[in-house]
Amino acid sequence: MMSAPDAPAAPNTPTPARGPLGWARALYDWVLSWADTPHGLSALVVLSAVESIFFPIPPDVLLIALTLGARARWARLALACTLASVVGGLIGYALGATVWEQISDTFYQLVPGFTEAKFLQIKGLYEEWDFWIVFAAGFTPIPYKVITVSAGACDISLPIFIVASVLSRGARFFLVAKLLHVYGAPMRDFIERRFNLLTIGLMAALVGGFAALKLLL
């Protein structure tokens, strides 16, 4: 059954940039402003791709706004977001596999909180947990862009990377869009404030379930 779109929300008014994180607020508002244009879907595709490489604002921001404006299109929007994000992830993987030594310093500067020490820590974890690291980054608040580039730099299996990316990115974006499709605007506050905790909880339950299954077998 097709759900009727919610009533249009009031126009987004950019918040003046103040303080050391003012640039992040301004960038967030700029991303959100695309929802009020005819190019919203195209912007979502581009944002989803570049966020998988270096862009700091997650595509969920625009996905939420677009889905609320056209709830009947939730699956199409989630699919576009997923495919673009995975394509961007593959570009990040290729960059890591081919030119990491040349771009590493720039990457450390572009991605807040990501350092050479953290890269080396991730590299050691890939040897045992390659699929789960990629899946966790694609589904939870862990920056997916950090994993896409480092996965290529660490030369993890490309098929494993693709499968984990498709499953995790798809699960995240389809979950966001479906919740908005079913519950509409009242769900937006939950997603914006508590969705990260939900994804962490689901991820922990999933890993715990597989660990328990492994022990039983």
Image: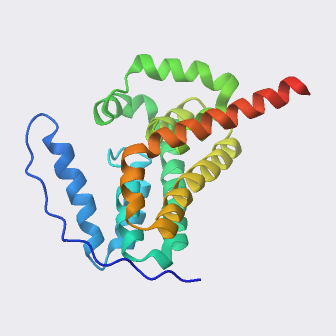
Q: Nearer the viewer, residue 147 or 157?
A: 147
> Where in the figure is residue 85, as x and y percent of width and height?
49, 55
Q: Nearer the viewer, residue 66 or 5?
A: 5
In the picture as drawn, the residue positioned furthest to the right comes out as: 217
On the picture, is 205 further left or further right than 112? right
Number of marks drawn = 0
> Where in the figure is residue 99, as x and y percent of width and height?
45, 36
Residue 140 in sight = no
Query: Which quadrant does the C terminus fall into?
Result: top right
Identify which residue is drawn at 42% across, 52% down: 191
Indicate whether 74 appears above or below 172. Answer: below
Q: Nearer the viewer, residue 113 or 72?
A: 72
Colour scheme in use? rainbow
> Where in the figure is residue 41, as x and y percent of width and height?
39, 72
Identify which residue is drawn at 60% across, 48% down: 168
Query: Which quadrant does the N terminus fall into?
Result: bottom right
> Where in the figure is residue 79, as x and y percent of width and height?
55, 66
Identify which residue is drawn at 80% across, 27% down: 212
On the picture, is 87 further left or further right than 187? right
Residue 79 in sight = yes
Q: Quadrant of residue 107?
A: top left
Indicate whether 112 appears above or below 85. Answer: above
